Image: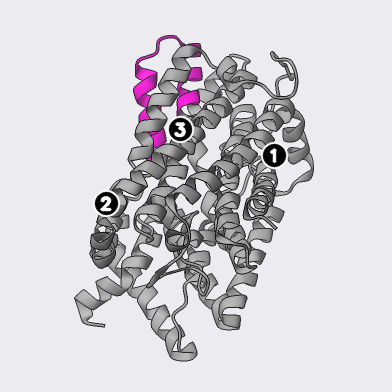
Amino acid sequence: MSIYLIALLFALLGAAIFTVIGLISGTDETAIMVPITLLVILLGAPPEGVFAFFMAGVLAKHLTHAVPTALLGIPGDTTAVPLIDHANTLRRLGMPHVALRKMISGGVIGAFIALPTAVLLGQFLGQFADFFKSSSGIIFTLAAILIAFFSKGKWASLLIIIPFAFFIKALDSVSFAMLDKHLSITFFLGIAIGPMFSNILMAASPVAKNDLTRSKQNQYNLAPETKSWKGYFPNPFKILSKRQTIFTSITTFLSSLTFVFSPVGMTSLMGEIVGSRTKGAYKKSTTSLTVMNGVTESTYIAEAIIPLIAFGIPLSPVALGPASPLFNAPPIFTVDPVNNLHTLMSSWDFFIFGLIGISVAALIAYPFAMNYARKASVLVLKYISQEAIVAMFIGLAFLLAYNEAQLLGVVLTFTVATVGGLLNRILGVGAGVQFMVFYASSWIMLQLFGI
């Protein structure tokens, strides 16, 4: 079977899965993308199929996450949090459907701008790959400090770097002594599912469960469905004004270049810059939402592709989080030595198979969200339990951890999930900081204690 046909099939699979998942509010990108991408890799998918699957999943997830954000006023995932204020403004004006259309149209445009930009920048930065690989330990440490400083936990995140590195190294030493090999997948999964697992622990605690308890059920008011285009496939350039298209194009191009910064931070920054230059509540909110959702797409795509092409080691928040299996999924992909998509695919391959992925996602998720957003929201609210979704991903993490190291892998995964999740939930030490410290832990411990 042709590799292009295989990639197309995997792109269809990724788009279908994440189109549905994106409709479920409150899902975390890392917690859902890491286990599913790992599963695809470990089941033997070819590199091109894995990449097309991931690209389709990223775009589909970020298109349909706009549905609960715009229609219900609750963030579809963590990158949708900065969009809530403007989405609520349009909901108060009685135009949540307008917010939705602007958001996902901006997302489609942002994805197709980010892909070629990221491939070209990745090729350019590839000239410095040897330096980055040889200095990876100190680079990861400095990056952890930088991300921690700009995270919501800030000083706590900075103070926790060395203790968390010691914790990771200690667990690694114990597992190596028992299995005579270093584990990676168990640590990835533990950090990824940490926030979800911490909620379960808090709900099981008589002391902490009050923070999660609600006195009444949430109520949502959905506006009637309206349609302003003919046919099934709307044209995003006709949904957006000329000004919105220009702003989205500029901001998504610029945000694609800043691959070392937080996607949430870039989304907020670009939205504020554009919003400050737009007058009127309606125009300001619609333009900001268009730009911000475009930036969520461009940052995610660029932050995955640029380190893959240029270095082969994860040097961005997305590469350390949702895209981490593309770099390190032993025994198939590894970072030490570098044997992953960086060595198995050319720059042209990244462009072609990335284009297949985002094109398929755009053809599936975009018209679906535009035509059936309201009906899909009703079905999700009525029939899909968020607790069941959490249980499903934790169960998948259990399966993958057991596959890597049997019972020890499971225990290690949930040990890391407990510590990392509570650090995230209580102190604001985000997954990006934790992933970066995980990669830097060996270097930090070597410098401090010679081990």
Cα distance, mark 2 to mark 3?
27 Å
Whether residues under marks 2 and 3 lie with C-beta atoms below 8 angstroms apart, the answer is: no
Frontmost residue, 325 versus 178: 325
Which numbered circle lies on residue 113? Answer: 3
Q: Earlier in the sequence, mark 1 or mark 2?
A: 2
Q: Amino acid at mark 3?
A: Ile
The residue mark sitting in front, 3 or 1, is: 3
Estimate the x, y position of residue 104 in percent, counting from the top left. Answer: 58, 29
In magenta segment, residue 125: no
Q: Looking at the image, which residue is at 31% across and 67% down?
A: 440
- State which region is magenta: 265-291
Residue 141 visible, this angle: no
Whether residues under marks 1 and 2 lie with C-beta atoms below 8 angstroms apart, the answer is: no
Q: Looking at the image, which residue is at 44% across and 33% down?
A: 295
Q: Is residue 434 left or right of residue 191?
A: left
Cα distance, mark 3 to mark 1?
41 Å
**SS at badge 1:** loop
Q: Amino acid at mark 2?
A: Leu
In magenta segment, residue 288: yes
Q: Which residue is mark 1?
A: 217
Q: Counting other residues with Cα less than 10 Å from the Cα at mark 1, is it few (<14), some (14-19), or many (20 or more)?
A: few
Q: Counting other residues with Cα less than 10 Å from the Cα at mark 3, is it few (<14), some (14-19), or many (20 or more)?
A: many
Q: Looking at the image, which residue is at 70% across and 58% down?
A: 1
Q: Earlier in the sequence, mark 2 or mark 3?
A: 3
Q: Which residue is mark 2?
A: 146
Q: Earlier in the sequence, mark 3 or mark 1?
A: 3
With respect to residue 231, does 211 lie above or below?
below
**SS at badge 2:** helix
Q: Looking at the image, which residue is at 51% across and 76% down?
A: 412
Estimate the x, y position of residue 450 in percent, counting from the top left. Answer: 21, 82
